């Protein structure tokens, strides 16, 4: 006999999932604000849950602790970067753009735009005050980013091609740091334009 799930049960499950996602989002946003203000080391769990209007038990339930919350915040930040970049590149392709460098430029500028909007959080991730294991996670993400850039740019699979993409990826990474450190949007835009020039010189 197949047991049917009532509409009330379905709606209840959806509500529970929605509440869980909302709680996690509040904790991530609170962590972003607290880590930006105090750094990872000096930030306390009490600071985060107070900002989120949540509880210590809720933080441990959803993330396991301060370190895990930091790593989840990094993952969330990178995932949103990738989502926005992929959407921008897809939109450019749909409009008829097929030049790899032009598509890379669209993706890079979308990346930099998000970095500028969240520059305080970007600084948290590259200034060195991070939990154990973060560097390994960042290196793994970096290797995946190089692979994605290689596909987008259509570079050769030989040694020169691989090194070229690695250098281009480093240019974008360093430029992102400079964007986050810029005092004004104009200064950040100058960094973005300079990065585009450097990438074009390597690709052409």
Image (cartoon, rainbow, N blue to C red):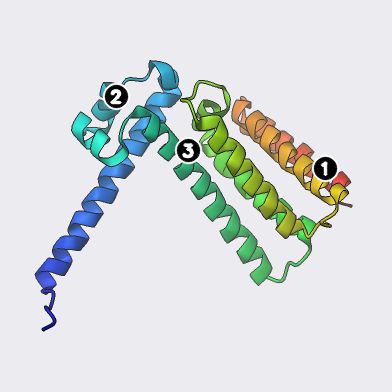
Mark 1 or mark 2, earlier in chain:
2
| Foreground residue among 137 and 56 | 137
Number of the front mark, 3 or 1:
3
| Percent of width and height locating residue 104 | 72, 54
In this orientation, does residue 187 appear? Answer: yes
Locate residue 150: give its quadrant. bottom right
Instruction: Indicate the secondary structure of the residue bearing disc 1.
Output: helix
* Dot 3 and dot 1 residues touching (CB under 8 Å): no
What separation in Å lies between label 3 and label 2 (alpha carbons)?
17 Å
- Where 29 sits versus 181, above or below? below
Q: Residue at x 79, y 63 (%)?
A: 99
Write down the residue under mark 2: 45
According to the picture, the residue beneath numbered tag 3 turns out to be 74
Query: Is label 1 in contact with label 2 (beta carbons under 8 Å)?
Result: no
Q: Residues within 10 Å of mark 2 (few under 14, many from 20)?
A: some
Residue positioned 35% across, 28% down in the render = 66
Label of residue 197 in the image: 1
- Tag 2 or tag 3, which sits nearer the N-term? 2
Q: Is residue 53 left or right of residue 63?
A: left
């Amino acid at each position: 006999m197949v047991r049917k799930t009532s509409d009330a049960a379905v709606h209840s499950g959806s509500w529970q999932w929605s509440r869980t996602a909302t709680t996690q989002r509040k904790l991530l946003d609170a962590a972003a604000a607290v880590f930006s203000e105090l750094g990872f080391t000096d930030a306390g769990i009490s600071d985060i849950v107070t900002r989120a209007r949540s509880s210590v038990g809720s933080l441990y339930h959803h993330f396991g602790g301060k370190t895990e919350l930091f790593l989840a915040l990094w993952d969330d930040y990178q995932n949103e970067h990738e989502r926005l970049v992929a959407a921008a590149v897809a939109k450019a392709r749909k409009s008829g753009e097929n030049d790899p460098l032009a598509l890379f430029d669209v993706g890079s500028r979308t990346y930099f735009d998000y970095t500028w909007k969240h520059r305080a959080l970007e600084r948290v991730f590259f200034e060195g005050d991070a939990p154990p294991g973060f560097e390994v996670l960042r290196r793994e993400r970096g290797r995946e980013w190089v692979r994605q850039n290689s596909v987008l740019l259509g570079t050769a699979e030989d040694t020169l091609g691989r090194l070229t993409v690695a250098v281009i990826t480093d240019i974008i990474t360093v430029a992102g740091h400079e964007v986050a450190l810029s005092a004004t949007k104009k200064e950040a835009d100058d960094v973005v334009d300079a990065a585009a020039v450097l990438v074009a010189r390597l690709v052409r």
